[in-house]
Amino acid sequence: MPTQNDFQLLPSQSGADCMSICLQNIRSFLISTHLHQTIAAHMCEEPTKPEMPDYYFDLGLTQDATRSEIKKAFHNLALLHHPDKKAPGESVDAVEFRQAREAYEVLTDNDEKDTYDDDYVWVQSDWIRYRRKLKDWEQYLEEERLRIEAEEQARRQAAEEHDRRQAALEAERRRKEEAKKNRQDPEDCETRRSNFAEWAFRQAERLKKEAIKQEEVDRQQQEFEGMDRRRKAAEAQEKKAEEQRRKVKEWMRPKEAQKEEDRRRQRSAERDQRRQARGYGPRSHGGLCPCAQCVYDHWVEAYKQEVAEAKRLSEEAAQRAREEMERKAKEHLEKQAATEKNRQEREKNRQEREKKAHERKQAAKARAAETKTQATAQKQREEQEKKARLRMANEHIHKQQHAYLSTLAESGQEVGTTDVVIDIGWIKKKGVAECLFCGNRINYFSFHCPEGGIVLKGALWRAIRASCSSVNTRLQSKILRK
């Protein structure tokens, strides 16, 4: 980086030399500190267009273009941007057509063209600076958009991570509460285990659905990022090709200008030669010709040269026109090929997306069918288990009744018609449960079979404990069948 000593002037240096050295030092300082990049990166306002249009740039020409080239360029742009040439439904603002027409009117008027050419150096520099600032502004907007999208994605991921942490903390808290309750009241362990298992199943289903949804969101994000990367790659390739074309054009411009200058000099020299050749005629000798044959020969030779020059110029113009038409046709074919290739790629991508979507739907249907099948199998197992427990409870009750009747028979007593209460050995437990006989909810206490673990509410318990007479036995069987 330049220091303060670099900007000091020597006494022996002149004013112009000192100014030149100062400007060079300031320029090197700005380049070394990248000040222009800092300004472009931190700008927040769109640049303003220059007041004076760049007519040569609007027509796609340089300042040394001839009148015929200006007319030809305007004709091509008029055919391209005329409102009558627009397809139905497209914008008919015709801004490009108005710009081309204004440029043509100014550049074909000799007085206005001379006035415009005097200031064109400043106009061109203003437009170059404007295009550079506009490019930096567009790049700044694109970077801001990407930054906002990245921040939004980060916030969304942080929120999802926070939700997952909260769900995990809530599950841990409930687990600890369940463990604490189980330690405080051992009799309710089975009920709490069943409730916790049901809650855990619901939590697992919810987390599974969230995972599927998150997977879908991630897939869509990946597809969007892939499309964005492909678009950026295509834009970068297009910019690179445009830069190469611009460099080739810049490289060819001095040579083309030199060739045009050589042709002009050659035409000027030939015109001077023809004029000098005509000077040997009668006019240079005051109407007297020293040799009529020589004058005639000179006139014929000059006429032949003019005809040959006109023919050569016509052939060159025709050749340039053919080359321009061939170039445009080639560019049109290349553009059509690129458009067709892009269309095929889009169609291929669409088919792939539809295929993946169909596969995801089929997988979701298969998972849903599998879940339904598992739920049905679980329900059937629960029904079978319930029937087995009911059967074991009935067998236990019948065993107790037969044991009571056997005891009466051994003691020689007779079975009377009065109600007799017997103890069938079921365990009484407090807590909320569900009766497996009638399916009702038990709020306070229930009776549990020691063999099958069946749960019975109090009303059915009192009916089962009735006497073992034939009438009451039928009543028992009837109740048990319910």
Image (tube, helix red, strand yellow):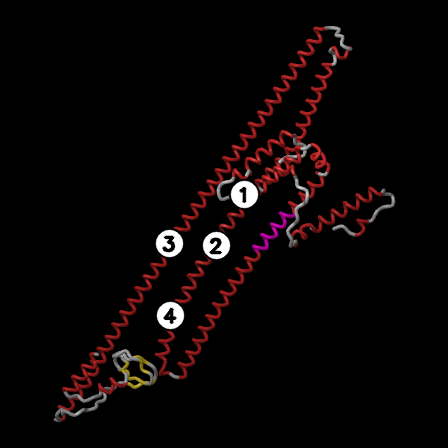
Say which amino acid is labelled 3: Glu
- Give the Cα distance between marks 3 and 4: 27 Å
For marks 2 and 4, the one nearer the N-term is: 4
| Mark 2 neighbour class, 10 Å CA radius: few under 14, some 14 to 19, many 20 or more | few
Residue at 12% from the left image edge and 92% from the top image edge: 414
- Give the Cα distance between marks 2 and 4: 31 Å
Q: Say which element carries label 2.
A: helix
Q: Say which element carries label 1.
A: loop
Pick whichever, 194 or 433, lies toward us. 433
| Image mark for residue 245 | none
- The residue carrying mark 3 is 359
Quarter of the image with the C terminus in it = bottom left
Q: Quadrant of residue 96?
A: top right
Q: Is residue 104 above or below residue 197?
A: above
The span picked out in magenta is 133-146
- Indicate which label's residue lies in the foreground, 4 or 1: 1
- Residue 214 appears left or right of 92: left
- The residue carrying mark 2 is 222
Pick whichever, 304 or 207, lies toward us. 304
Asked if one can make out residue 453 in the rendered structure from this viewpoint, the answer is: no
Q: Does the magenta stretch include residue 273?
A: no
- The residue carrying mark 1 is 92
Pick whichever, 164 or 331, lies toward us. 331
Q: In this view, does 411 lie above or below 392?
A: below
- The residue carrying mark 4 is 201
Say which amino acid is labelled 4: Phe
